[in-house]
Image (cartoon, rainbow, N blue to C red):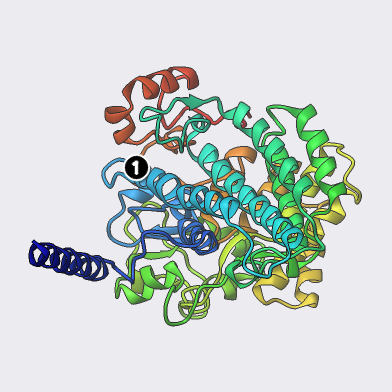
Amino acid sequence: MKKKYLILLVLVASFTTCTDKFEEFNTDVKNPAIVKGESLFSNAERLLARAISSTNVNLNIFKLMAQYWTECTYIDEANYDLVNRSIPDNVFEQYYQGVLKDLQEAAILIDAALPDAGEDVATHEAEQTNKLAIIELLNVYAFQNLVDIFGDIPYTEALDIEKISPMYDDAATIYGDLITRIDAALGDMDDSEASFGSADLIYNGDVEHWRKFGNSLKLKIAITMADANASLAKSTAEAAVTGGVFTSNDDNALFPFLSATHTNPIYEDLVQSGRNDFVPANTIVDIMNDLADPRRPYYFTTIGGNYLGGSYGYESPYSLYSHIPDEIAAPNFPGILMTYDEVLFYMAEAAQRDFSVGNNVGALYGDAIKASILFWGGTETEANNYVASPDVHYATAPGTWREKIGTQAWIAFYTRGLEGYTIWRRMDYPIFNIGSLITTYDEIPIRFPYPVSEQTLNKASYTAAASAIGGDLISTPVFWDIN
């Protein structure tokens, strides 16, 4: 009997050892099941920067939508074929399953994390609070992008795994809630405490910079909705400026793509791919030529000493037109989330609307243009001379204030396709060109249609959303686009 028990114990021990070995062999050390929240936050920043920067026609055609670039041979996307490549579906996936999901998981893990051995509890909690507030600001940034692309979107139920058919929320209501979320995040921040440190690839954990980003984002939201809700826009913009927005190019929110790995998507699409799919569009090249804009050598190469853009929406052979310069197509050209010049343009518009934001509109408008020129590499002299020229100076430039601010902001937002597309929709300037496969200006989309996957997998919510916005059409305006 003792022998039987001994054999049984040996078998149990052997089985336990084998089980441990199997667990060891079946563990993918390169793809852990659980990662630190800070690592997920870093990846969310990377995914967001890629979503903004990419020029892959399957993922991001906003440089085409803004008529900064045009296609050389395959011109469907420059003529607003959004369905053939399932572009709306891919945008949804980028943001919901990529950026927002990683931010959600990062927040859950960080909120649950206990202090390390020997770590001061109060310090841990302060840093934890700062991290969660920063995550919230990027959540707001991502959700605003989605609203600006589609209008009403899944929001309150979007990331709840129990809601397999999430409802769509009203876009204007979402904007109001985004302001509330920014205020809560800013209220939680403690500038004297640390946050992510090197895990934050944008500001290296500098909470003061994130506070400026939060206020600048708040200003952006306020100005974007100003035509739809002037009173809320006014109070929100004034509070944002009082709270402290960007004050120089040192505050710019830039994601540092690397030279070898994690490279700039523009480099991947234009250089690494070996393809010659895009050239600058005549829309922007012609406007900048007419103004003798000093940013042209930073935006375009020359052909025979001249800046020449391809006809937007028409076949534009690569060899005949200006190209995207090496600096923009470099592997380490940064992803641009927000810049000082962008903030100044919002302040100029706020001043024009008689919001109390400090300087007069002409000074803010001029400073915005100068900040853009300096950001791209121009000199103070070039910037001052350009702003003083009659066709640019705020007091003498032709057109309404919408045309002046809209055109110059659109020029400054080059490479930031969604922002360029949004400023055109809000201001109705500059005047765009009509491609070869459409016949009227009204055929230029002013929003993206919802994904086909939503129509098939979330049909009831999709149908309700389409009805609420007046039809899931490219001609249905986002709530703030009322001019």
Q: Residue at x 58, y 74 (%)?
A: 298
Q: Residue at x 38, y 64 (%)?
A: 278
Q: Position of residue 295 (x, y in %)?
A: 64, 70
Q: Which one is in front, 31 or 166?
A: 31
Res 70 → quadrant: bottom left
Count of residue discs = 1
Instruction: Tell me if 76 is positioned left or right of 479 in this view.
Output: left
Res 254 → quadrant: bottom right
**Does residue 398 appear in this view?**
no
**Does residue 356 appear in this view?**
yes
Q: Residue at x 50, y 62 (%)?
A: 36
Res 30 → quadrant: bottom left
Q: Position of residue 260 (x, y in %)?
A: 43, 82
Q: Which residue is mark 1?
A: 89
The quarter of the image holding the N terminus is: bottom left
Q: Can you say whether 466 is above or below 362 in the image?
A: above
Q: Residues within 10 Å of mark 1 (few under 14, many from 20)?
A: some
**In the structure shown, which secondary structural element does the residue marked by tag 1 occupy?**
helix
> Which residue in the rendered view is the most extreme toward the front?
1
Q: Position of residue 303 (x, y in %)?
A: 46, 77
Q: Which one is in front, 314 or 104?
A: 104
The quarter of the image holding the C terminus is: top right
Q: Position of residue 437 (x, y in %)?
A: 32, 43
Q: Can you say whether 344 is above or below 271 in the image?
A: above
Q: Which one is in front, 460 or 62?
A: 460
Q: Can you say whether 123 is above or below 85 in the image?
A: below
Instruction: Tell me if 68 is positioned left or right of 165 in this view.
Output: right
Three-letter amino acid code at disc 1? Asp
